[in-house]
Image (cartoon, grey):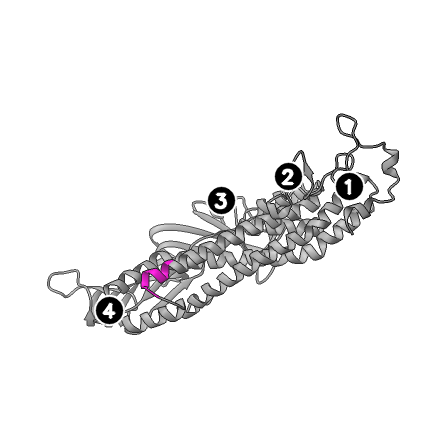
């Protein structure tokens, strides 16, 4: 149904008086009905753009236009992440001189230059959404959400305030992170862990002491004090690099995260609430995990969650690895591998993690376009105000364009995500 058909028979228009321009000439109702305009209309020689042209102010109804704004934010985020993934894939190909399929090319290069591939220790990137961003997006959509202390429901972990008085709610526990050159860590260590070895034992890291076997590096001129990897048994201490947070039976150099003591997190560099089992809990900071925005209407909830998700921030992954070059390994491969480990792979894995969350936001928006938003437009039509009825018809006309934006950006993003997954799977980094 077009807008002309929608308004034929509305006698209220006649009661309001005829619409004229400043010279008293009648205005074509198809273009302007008493000053009302829609995307596609031409005013003073300028065509009004719709959502496809980047215009989110379609209806003037906050709960409806918030959806169009979230759609454009999703498009920007999805396209940006897609381009970022493609850029890293292209750079990896160029570094290794690969033509054709990247994952297959990497596997062939590894087989040709490494003794037994690369063994990774890996902690995936951490992505967190700002609870306040979700609240602000909800407030723009629903006037019932305003200032004051407003929280989101978080499932995972939530950055907490660094003070002794702070407490997590009953469904979560407080954890503190401290740093020091060397500390005894009763929780999770991230960095390096040095454990004493009184009797000879295998050391998967750096052996500091005596090595009953082959030592790669010595700290003394006589070649008796090992300070490198030990192929055999080590006596003294063993220093292991930890990419992922792990238990440390010794001293931790880096970050140590443990459940908060009675005094809270005073002196810590970071505090976070972690949900018990799979429970949700209230979060005011940054939620690392699934989250639900404040309780608002269905269409506002979808828009607010999408807006927060596309503005998510991810930290790079932590990687530690072991490999051995073949005697005839090429210099180009060695340089490319160093670049892959230090630069390309962290950036790619970070983009992959963000892509997954942005893709989910697109799925939610697509569902909202067909359900909550369309339903809200229908419900608002019960208001007989002419301006509102006209504006809602404008929104209805723009929903197909919004759905196309979501679908096109989602398809492109999911394609790039699959390419990144292929590389991660080849390297054994499936998480």
| Viewer-nearest of discs 3 and 4 | 4
In the figure, 369 relative to 166: above or below? below
Kindly identify which numbered label has been placed on residue 148. 2
Q: How many marks?
A: 4
From mark 4 to mark 2, how far is it between C-alphas? 62 Å
Residue at disc 3, secondary structure: loop
Return the residue nearer the eye: 420 or 430: 420
Residue at disc 2, secondary structure: loop
Label 2: few (<14), some (14–19) or many (≥20) C-alpha neighbours in 10 Å: few
Q: Earlier in the sequence, mark 4 or mark 1?
A: 4
Q: Residue furthest left?
A: 222
From mark 2 to mark 3, how far is it between C-alphas? 20 Å
Q: Is residue 243 left or right of residue 213?
A: right
The residue at which mark 4 appears reads as 329
From mark 1 to mark 3, how far is it between C-alphas? 48 Å
Q: Residue at x 61, y 48 (%)?
A: 52
Q: Which residues are magenta?
A: 91-98
Quarter of the rendering containing residue 289: bottom right
| Viewer-nearest of discs 4 and 1 | 1
The residue at which mark 3 appears reads as 162
From mark 4 to mark 1, how far is it between C-alphas? 71 Å
The residue at which mark 1 appears reads as 388
Label 4: few (<14), some (14–19) or many (≥20) C-alpha neighbours in 10 Å: some
């Amino acid at each position: 149904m077009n807008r002309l058909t929608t308004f034929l028979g509305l006698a209220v228009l006649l009661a309001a008086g005829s619409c004229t321009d400043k010279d008293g000439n009648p205005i074509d109702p198809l273009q302007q009905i008493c000053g009302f305009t829609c995307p596609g209309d031409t005013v003073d020689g300028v065509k009004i753009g719709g959502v496809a042209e980047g215009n989110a102010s379609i209806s003037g109804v906050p709960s409806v236009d918030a959806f169009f704004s979230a759609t454009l934010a999703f498009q920007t985020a999805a396209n940006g992440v897609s381009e970022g993934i493609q850029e890293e894939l292209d750079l990896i190909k160029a570094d290794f001189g690969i033509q054709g399929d990247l994952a297959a090319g990497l596997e062939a290069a590894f087989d040709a230059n490494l003794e037994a591939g690369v063994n990774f220790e890996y902690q995936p990137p951490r992505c967190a959404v700002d609870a306040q961003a979700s609240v602000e997006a909800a407030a723009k959509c629903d006037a019932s959400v305003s200032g004051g202390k407003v929280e989101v429901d978080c499932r995972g972990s939530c950055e907490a305030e660094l003070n002794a008085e702070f407490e997590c709610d009953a469904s979560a526990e407080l954890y503190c992170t401290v740093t020091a050159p060397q500390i005894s860590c009763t929780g999770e260590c991230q960095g390096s862990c040095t454990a004493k070895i009184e009797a000879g034992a295998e050391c998967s890291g750096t052996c500091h002491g005596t090595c009953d076997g082959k030592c790669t590096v010595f700290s003394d001129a006589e070649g008796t004090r090992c300070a490198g990897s030990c192929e055999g048994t080590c006596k003294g201490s063993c220093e292991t690099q930890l990419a992922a947070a792990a238990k440390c039976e010794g001293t931790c150099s880096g970050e140590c995260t443990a459940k908060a003591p009675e005094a809270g997190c005073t002196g810590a560099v970071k505090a976070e609430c972690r949900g018990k089992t799979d429970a949700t809990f209230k979060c005011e900071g940054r939620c690392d995990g699934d989250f639900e925005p404040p309780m608002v209407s269905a269409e506002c909830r979808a828009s607010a969650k999408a807006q927060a998700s596309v503005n998510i921030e991810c930290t790079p992954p932590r990687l530690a690895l072991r490999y051995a070059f073949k005697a005839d390994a090429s210099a180009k491969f060695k340089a490319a591998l160093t670049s892959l480990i230090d630069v390309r792979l962290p950036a790619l894995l970070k983009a992959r993690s963000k892509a997954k969350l942005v893709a989910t936001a697109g799925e939610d928006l697509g569902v909202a376009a067909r359900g909550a938003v369309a339903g809200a437009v229908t419900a608002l039509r019960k208001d007989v105000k002419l301006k509102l009825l006209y504006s809602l018809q404008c929104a209805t006309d723009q929903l197909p364009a919004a759905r196309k934006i979501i679908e096109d950006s989602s398809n492109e993003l999911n394609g790039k995500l699959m390419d990144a997954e292929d590389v991660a799977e080849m390297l054994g980094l499936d998480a």
